Image (tube, rainbow, N blue to C red):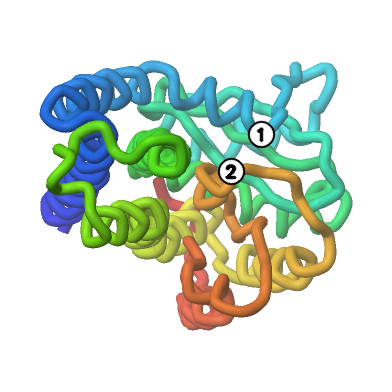
Amino acid sequence: MQFWNTMKTGVLLAALTGMFVVIGSALGGQVGMVIAFIFAIALNMGAWWFSDKLALRMSGAREVTPAEAPDLHEMVEVLSARAGIPKPRVYIIDSEAPNAFATGRSPSKGAVAVTTGIARMLTRDELAGVVAHELAHIKHRDTLISSIAATIAGAITMLAEMAMWASIFGGFGGQDEEDSGIAGMIGGILMIILAPIAALLIQMAISRSREFSADAGGARILGDPLPLASALEKLEWAAGRVPMQTSSATSHLYIVNPLRGGGLSGLFRTHPNTTERIARLRALPRASAVA
């Protein structure tokens, strides 16, 4: 199962890279395509080494010491020992919106970030369930894949915006004059609109299946699925009422989707339905904590 999940993720990330190259081609023809491909490889390598720092910086997270947050540090230490991974670094995000995420390219480089709002809303057991969920992401190495996807998806959105301005002020550089008619313009406009949506859809495909796995893994680490189920219920309720300032490129990292809206936006959620997640957790048996 792990092999096929890894293969599927590799294909999805390759699709993200391919879209990056297509947009580069639209902007600069063959030269733009080559530059975009080189840039995509550099982005993948950069995401491998620096995605955790970028995600933490974009979220406004600050690292806290055991003296500053003793209870949270103790909770993370105990649960990471149960999970069989090194204790990750601990961060706090100054936000009333209750949420949390994990990042890091490997279990030895992991980091867990929680908002000030989540610590105030949840009971200790519920917060432990959330932390266990994030530790499961680190243990399963989901954080590396999600961070790379966020980096490339953000870059695709940036390139699509560049393509939009290029079309407004002179067309796409990679087209000859005879190819720059109405059909070319329509194709360019469709690419500008659809590329970010396609990037989001790929992020969704990566994120949704991994959330169910992290829920089950967090329940095993804690030894009880009910606190996490209760926490998700509260977090889903709060997500629609307490806005959170965050980027769409990193929204899939959080335990619940921090970006909400009406209309078609619900079709592009990066997380599985929270009601289904809660139902699956409540169907799990209680057991002693396992790594």
Q: Quadrant of residue 200?
A: bottom left
Q: Quadrant of residue 190?
A: bottom left
| Residue ID for mark 1 | 59
The x and y percentages for residue 241 are 83, 67
Residue sitting farthest toward the front: 178
Instruction: Look at the numbered disc 1 and give the secondary structure of its residue.
Output: helix
Is residue 176 among what the camera can see?
A: yes
The image shows a total of numbered marks equal to 2
Occupied quadrant, residue 57 = top right
Residue 215 or residue 83, whichever sits in front: 215
* Residue 101, disc: 2
Kindly report the distance in space between the C-alpha atoms of the residues bearing marks 2 and 1.
10 Å
Kindly identify the residue that appears in the image at 50 percent across and 42 percent down: 135
Q: Do the residues bearing badges 2 and 1 touch, measured as CB atoms within 8 Å?
A: yes
Q: Position of residue 5 (x, y in %)?
A: 20, 54
Residue at x-position 59% and y-position 34%: 112
